Image (cartoon, grey):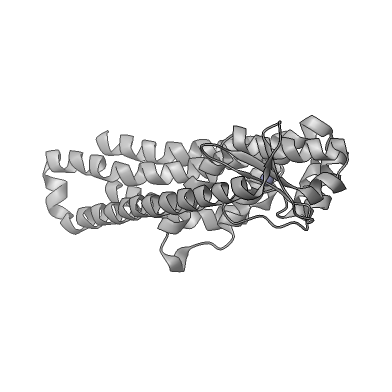
Amino acid sequence: MVPLALAGVAVALVWLAPGLLARQRRLRPAPRAALVAWQAVSLGGVLAALSVAPAVLPLLLGGDDLRSHPWLVALALLVTVVVLGRLLLSGHRVGTRIRQARTEHRELVDILGEHDRDGLVVLQHPTPTAYCIPGRGSRVVLTRGVLDALPDDQLAAVVAHERAHLRARHDLLLEFFTVLHESVPPGLRSRTAMAEVRLLVEALADRAAVRRSGAVATARALVAVAEGRAPEVAMAASTSAPVRLHLLALGSQPLTASLAYALAVVAVALPLALLGLAWA
Ligand SMILES: [Zn+2]
């Protein structure tokens, strides 16, 4: 019963896999590959949900099978409608909320801050904090505290980290996962999934900082801004500093990356294989 299997795969990949993936800490030393695996698992889930109706079609054309399992087909279609419906609703809610909060925060920063010639905005605040406001008219925001506390190479690491977020549009990646996360029924939501994705995104931006200023300056800068707090809508440099320091020390792990990419391929291939089976 392929449509039912696809509906099951959709529920498993969209609603259950994030919680399981969040526990796979061994993927952390390969943040880029791990994020590809996270995206592939989610994409595989959406693909599976979208494939249920096309997988029912051969049964409709064949006739016999459908008459013998009408409730299974109805159940598969219902699961798909619920998964896709929740995804669309969550996408609308999350998108509206994030864009509104970000616009308001950007306006506030523009009123309070001083625009530097390098495209940085400086806030007169003693706590060493750095963050970026992504989206249209993106900003890298630094406090006076971080400018005063950090030597040039560490400051360059902090700015490289924030610019890596903006360049790679990590905000869109996080928005995508937030949409998926909030589409999951509250009882099934994994508390750790979003934190894990955020950590991977931070670890990825840390790599950009290391390429700019080296591992030692990046690690020192991380510790220096670890106390700072950034607004919820921004992407801060300060979260989860101890784990990120550990990941910096580990360096790149090609075997871990290969495992994560293999997982990504399986997650996308599974729904496609099932759809192929329905039409075979
Ligand atoms: Zn960051």
Can see residue 30? no
x, y percentage for residue 231? 62, 56
Q: Nearer the viewer, residue 77 or 91?
A: 91
Q: Nearer the viewer, residue 17 or 162?
A: 162
Q: Nearer the viewer, residue 83 or 3?
A: 83
Q: In the rendered image, which quarter contains the C terminus? A: top left
Can see residue 275? yes
Lateral position of residue 137 relative to residue 222, left or right: left
Q: How many marks?
A: 0
Q: Residue furthest bottom?
A: 187
x, y percentage for residue 116? 71, 36
x, y percentage for residue 125? 75, 54
Q: Residue at x 23, y 56 (%)?
A: 72
x, y percentage for residue 192? 59, 60
Q: Nearer the viewer, residue 87 or 21?
A: 87
Q: Residue at x 54, y 47 (%)?
A: 174
Lateral position of residue 203 relative to residue 82, left or right: right
Q: Residue at x 78, y 30 (%)?
A: 211
Q: Quadrant of ligand 1?
A: top right
For residue 84, above or below residue 71: above
Lateral position of residue 68 relative to residue 217, left or right: left
Q: Residue at x 45, y 54 (%)?
A: 97
